[in-house]
Image (tube, helix red, strand yellow):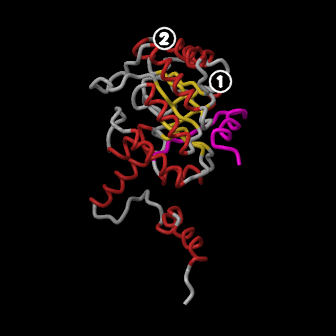
Amino acid sequence: MSSAPEQLRKILAEPGLVVMPAVWDGLTAKLTWEAGFKTAFLSGSCVAASRLGGPDLDLVSFGEMMDSFNMVRGAAPDLLVLADGDHGHGNAMNVQRTVAAYGRAGAAAVLIEDKITPRALTAAGKPCLPREEARMKIRAAVQAAKASGILVMARTDCRPTAGIDEAVARIEMFTEEGADILFMDSPADDAEIKRGIAAAKGRPSFVVLSPGAPRATPSQPEAEKLGFKIATYPTGMLSPAVAGMKSGLAALKAGEAESKAALPPAELRTTLGYPAYDAAAKPFIAKA
């Protein structure tokens, strides 16, 4: 059977927009696979929310992200996962270790971005590395990816702080360095989107389409028409999950047994795999 990176390359070569739900643990990965999705994005913001109960502000470690990846991989081994490698968790040598580790672990692709770490003590903006330092981090990632074949997605966060010209220049630079997938975060409008996609010179472009952020957020058909190849929704499962948990807690506080949105008990047990467990365990039951 072909490797995860090879399978993802084949999917990206097919026509149409590839939607990657954002996952963060075994349950979200299992549900994503069972819903018919072949690919998923291991989102740093979702991992931060689930592990820390907090925001995505560079507080999650490499070890925690890798642990979350292993949870995802264990629950849905055939799901092709784009792992959030963030800023590589350090300098160019840290980037190489991060990329190599995800490659060995079976990720199909890994994201590496150009923001400064540690970030300034504010939730506003993402100051980025000088251009040539950012180049070296992507160069290091591409070199490290050769051992496993894992795809490298290069992301620039510099649009809000350094402007669209610099953001486009970085996409061009990352393309020259051999990045497989390109991601220019926070374009302001369709014109900026088209510039970023053109700078990728035919390589797949990635976009975040969750609503609520100060950026252009096209619909799926619009995103495909503009030229995006991959779309993800970091709040797609996370926000409804939080709403469901709040609803469940409110029901308990009101003296009820469960929220009106709760699954029927039998459906929940089936979703969690109790019948599947019994079927798998049956051949190993010792006979009296």
Numbered circle sitting on residue 203: 1
Task: Return the residue at label 2.
Answer: 166
Give the answer, above or below, for where 126 lies relative to 280.
above
User: Label 1 sits on what residue type?
Assistant: Arg
Give the answer, above or below, for where 164 lies relative to 54.
above
Rendered location of residue 268, percent (x, y): 49, 64
Q: Furthest-top residue in view?
A: 165
Q: Which residues are magenta?
A: 1-24
User: Label 2 sits on what residue type?
Assistant: Glu
Nearer to the camera, 168 or 133:
133
Give the answer, above or below, for where 191 lies relative to 123.
above
Rendered location of residue 272, percent (x, y): 50, 62
Nearer to the camera, 146 or 255:
146
Picture residue at 42% right of the left edge, 12% below the top: 162
Q: Secondary structure at mark 2?
A: helix
Picture residue at 40% right of the left edge, 39% below the top: 62
Rendered image quadrant of residue 182: top right
Q: Furthest-bottom residue in view?
A: 288
Side (left or right) of 149 relative to 273: right
Real-space Cα distance between discs 2 and 1? 19 Å
Magenta run includes residue 69: no
